[in-house]
Amino acid sequence: MRAYAALKHNASQLHDSQPGPGLDVWLLGSAIMLLCIGLVMMGSASISVAERQLHEPFYYIWRQSAYIVVALLAGWAAFYVPINVWNKAGPYLLMFGTVLLALVLIIGKEVNGSLRWIDLGAFNIQPSELVKVYVVIFLAGYMLRRGEEMRTTIKGFLKPMMILSVVGILLLLEPDFGSGVVIALTALSMMFLGGVRLWQFGVLMMVMTMALGVLAYSSPYRVERLTSFLNPWADPFNSGFQLTQALIAFGRGEWMGVGIGSSVQKLFYLPEAHTDFLFAVISEELGLIGGLVIIALFGILVFRALRIGHIALCQKEYFAGYLAFGLGLLIGFQAFINIGVNMGVLPTKGLTLPLMSYGGSSMIATCLACAILLRISSEFPEAGMALSGDHRKMRKTP
């Protein structure tokens, strides 16, 4: 009887670890569309650069295709990991990510004045991209375990901030100011949604804003970036060059764009056209309509992530809910900042456009985030039908 009970218990655990039928097709569809459009537009933006630098016009296209395959395989594997496993692994993942950030400062590869990559021979890895996801997983677990302490005491509120400050310091030493801002915004938003007191949140926001301001103005190049975007035409051939070329790309695109492959700004006028400033090329070739479609797809993805988190919290699955909120906000903040930088409404940051810009680490990290979101929607199928308002089949809250 004991052997039978043990076998039944193991079979039940195995069944619970399998994904359910409630896959969120809206989230999956928007992510796939962004991937496909991104590959086409990244290829269009990179052909001239690849031909000039490497004498191989399809160099970046082939590499990006390989990155997408690896990212999809990593996402496929992550989809079959139960959510409770991510909860247990959160602290270890953050420690692993912190070690990688420290290694960057020791053996990292410098590109354009920043020490952000570890050279692995065939490819480079950018630990900060993975750390963004690790921070969200860790913080979701902390909010589950220490939620009451976090909401009622200063100590509980400051503990995760002190841990994340180590990550922030390592990022600033690279320097990677943009990733630090994204992580800070995501962490603060998660804690606000987790129910921290408004005055605590306000005080911490003021302290972090002052600290980031001091750090920004402590480096001349950061001051230049923060001031040049306000009036890039004051110095269009130096500090404002990148932004003025991006704005010219937006102007040339008008409503319908000049057509795929017909961009002029990508022909060595717009630096980093296939990475940080890909959205400017998209807007030039596909016009305002194309840019709005990209923004709408990101809006759908983020909305579905937040909706999945809401349904999970309604069922008192707090870790899954916090994790979905955090991953959705992470993707949303990065896309918002990248698009804002391209349009000249935010200071220049070295952030890629998720699922679209060239880069393996960013692609893998974002696909991992989307796979975890799909896993949450699969474990809680009600999230998949939430858009239609059908709540009659929702499980009763335990």
Image (cartoon, helix red, strand yellow):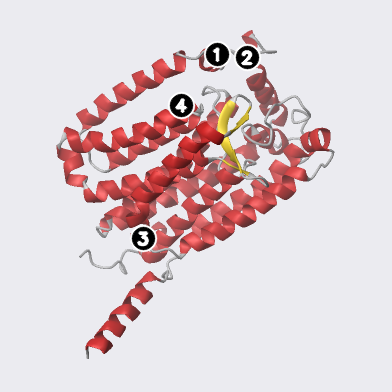
Of tags 3 and 1, which is closer to the observer?
3
Q: Secondary structure at mark 4?
A: helix
Label 4 vs label 1, nearer the camera? 4
Which residue matches tag 3? 85
Alpha-carbon span between mark 3 and mark 4: 31 Å
Task: Identify which amino acid the numbered label 4 is placed on.
Answer: Leu
Of the image marks 2 and 1, the number of the one nearer the N terminus: 1
> Tags 2 and 1 in contact by the CB under 8 Å rule?
yes
SS for callout 2: loop
* Label 1: element kind: helix
Distance CA(mark 2)–CA(mark 3): 47 Å
Pointers 3 and 4 in contact (C-beta within 8 Å): no
Precedes in sequence: disc 2 or disc 3:
3
The residue that appears at 40% across and 49% down in the rendered structure is 93
User: Where is residue 121, by image quadrant?
Assistant: top right
Image: 216 above or below 116: above
Answer with mark 4 or mark 1, whichever residue precedes in sequence. Answer: 4
Q: Which residue is mark 4?
A: 172
Q: Quadrant of the N terminus?
A: bottom left
Q: Which residue in the structure is indicated by mark 2? A: 239
